[in-house]
Structure formats: structure tokens, C-alpha cells
Image (tube, rainbow, N blue to C red):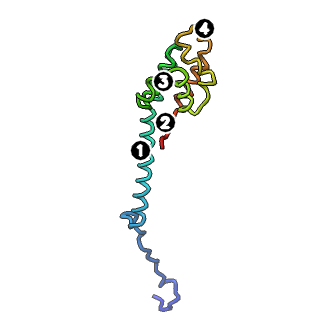
Amino acid sequence: MNSDPTSLDRLHDLVTPPPAPWWPLTPGPAIALAVAAAILLAWLLRIIMRWQADRYRREALALLEKTPPEQLSSLAKRVALTAWPREEVANLTGKPWLEFLDRSGDMDAFVNGPGNLIESLAFDPAAEKHEAPVRDSVREWIRKHRKEERP
């Protein structure tokens, strides 16, 4: 063997340490991962709860296509009874009913629009020619209505 310290015969491979393990995590990343998982779980839970809360809307929209014109007002009333207490909605008819639909749907389709014929469809056969705009107004109300917040 060559005694020269610069000789290539004396060259050895470098020994590298093993890579740091990924698991178990140190406290910092473990806490960050737990917080991220909690936020994701809360977000998913909120989506599921909203989906369940809007189930009546999906069912009403499916029923809307099969509902005869004379029962459009009763369908809207059934939807309103699902979302509001019976005392607030059950006795509404005429102009107060139309105002309620406009106010809760944040729209102007029932008092001043084509939706004002919703109740006359039940009694006047001549009003059936206006069924499509009334049905569209009811569809929009089912999709948009929100319960107003009380102070």
C-alpha cells in the first residue's frame, strides 16, 4: 500500500447517514396536520348538513314538474310550511301571501310580476295560459327563498 496521504488508494467512500424518518412527526407538523384535518372535517360536515337542510327544496323542485297548475299555490305553501313555523305561514292568502313570497324570495315576481296569478290558477280556467311564467316564478322562489333574520 502506498504511504502517500494523497494517493487514490487511500480514498474511502463517504458514509452518509440514513434519511430522517417521516414518522413519528415532531409536535409542530403533528399539530398543523391535526388542525388541517379538523378544518377539513368541519367543512365537509357543513356541506353535508346544508345538503340535508336543502333536501325539501330538491323534492319540491321535482314535484313542481308534476304539479297541475291549480295546485302551484298549495305546493308553494307546503314548501313555506317546511321552512317557517305554521303560525307565520298557514293563514296567508291573497296579497299578504304574495308579499310573503316576494319578501322571502328577495324578488318581485309575485306582487308585481307574473306570479300574481298563482292563486287565480286554482279557480280561473282562463288563467292557465299564464301557467309557464307562474311556474317559473315558483321555481325561482323555491330555489332562492331564505328565512329573514329577526333582531
* x then y, percent, for residue 130: 62, 15
Residue under circle 3? 92
Earlier sequence position, callout 1 versus callout 3: 1
**What residue sits right under mark 2 in the picture?**
147
Q: Quickly name the residue at label 4.
A: 126
Name the amino acid, label 4: Ala
CA distance separating discs 1 and 2: 22 Å
Element at label 4 = helix
Between disc 1 and disc 4, the foreground one is 4
The disc, 4 or 2, on the residue closer to the chain's N-terminal end is 4
Tell me which numbered mark, 3 or 2, is placed earlier along the sequence: 3
Mark carried by residue 45: 1
Residue at 42% across, 74% down: 17
* Residue closest to the eye, 14 or 3: 14
Amino acid type for the residue under numbered disc 3:
Leu
Residue pictured at 54% horizontal, 17% vertical: 119
Amino acid type, mark 2: Lys
SS category of the residue bearing label 3: loop
Image coords of residue 125 (percent x, y): 57, 7
Asked if residue 53 lies left or right of residue 144, the reply is left
Could you classify mark 1 by the number of other residues whose Cα lies within 10 Å: few (under 14), some (14-19), or many (20 or more)?
Answer: few
Distance from Cα at disc 1 to Cα at disc 3: 36 Å
